Amino acid sequence: MELTVTPNTRPVPLRTWTPPVAKHAPGTKVIHLKERSLVMLKQDLILRNPLRLLGQEKEEIIRPGSFGAVLARHGVGKTAMLIQIALNSLLQQKNILHISLDEPVGKVSIWYQEMFERLAQQYQVAQIDQLWDAIVPHRFIMTFRSEGFNAPRLEERLTDLTAQDIFVPNMMIVDGLSFETDNRSALESLKTLAGQLDLPVWFTITTHRHEGLAEDGLPVQLSPVQDLFDVALALDPEKDAIHIRAIKGTLKDEAKPALILDPATMLIQQKK
């Protein structure tokens, strides 16, 4: 005889465990693992940047509303130097407006990417693509014809950007402005605009091998307008290195090593 047993209880449904949702205080920014890793990577690159040896470890080299300049002969590394200053600010999530009077947007963009890749290779950065994607939205490249660049036109273009909330700069670079003729009036207008917008502004200034210095010991291009500039850095090629020399402003500490540009990579390095 076969005995059949019929259960008299209903099946109990399986329960699934749901982890509790973390609660955060109002206004608190949640940093996920990937984002946290990028934040730490940015901070590491900032701390390892040799620019801190110019005497500004936490702040920018020039204050908002002030002018800074990088001076050198043609092709020595003025733009490479300023792009590295810009990259350091981009890592701090500051918006950089790069104005080029000589080159198209595409070429300037390539320079940024090449300098960033060299920097990442030097410091063995693994997450190079993610880091680049994180900082590039903070950069805006604007071009002008040299003869058409002045403070009113720049203000008009900036107003278009800021009014539409497209881009609000925290620092500005002007690459390619001529200092061969009297441009004091134009620079004074730009400085007034920089003060109104609370922007530090960097310029490239091209010098020439055959020219001597002015009576004040500064390059003849800078001397007539030197009172408008807080900081001036000269790039002097010597043998196998390009020396970065502060000719005006910055805090100098003889105990700190000097800075150079490596001619092979154009990266800023400590002099050994």
Image (cartoon, grey):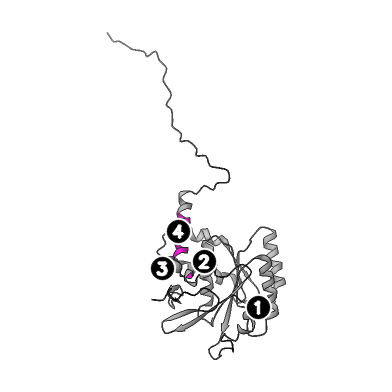
Give residue 6's position: percent from left, percent from top.
Answer: 36, 13
The dot on residue 122 is 3
The dot on residue 41 is 4
Name the N-terminal-most of marks 4 and 1.
Answer: 4
**The one of 258 and 269 positioned closer to us in this rendering:** 258
Give residue 103's position: percent from left, percent from top.
Answer: 59, 75
Q: Which amino acid does label 3 sit on?
A: Gln
Q: Distance between the residues labelled 1 and 2?
A: 25 Å
Element under label 4? helix
Residue labelled with disc 1: 146
Q: How far apart are marks 4 and 3 (CA)?
A: 14 Å
**The one of 199 and 124 positioned closer to us in this rendering:** 199
Residue labelled with disc 2: 87
Name the N-terminal-most of marks 4 and 3.
Answer: 4
Q: Does the magenta stretch include residue 77?
A: no
Q: Distance between the residues labelled 2 and 4?
A: 14 Å
Mark 1 or 2: in front is 2
Q: Distance between the residues labelled 4 and 1?
A: 38 Å
Residues tagged 4 and 3 counted as in contact (Cβ below 8 A): no
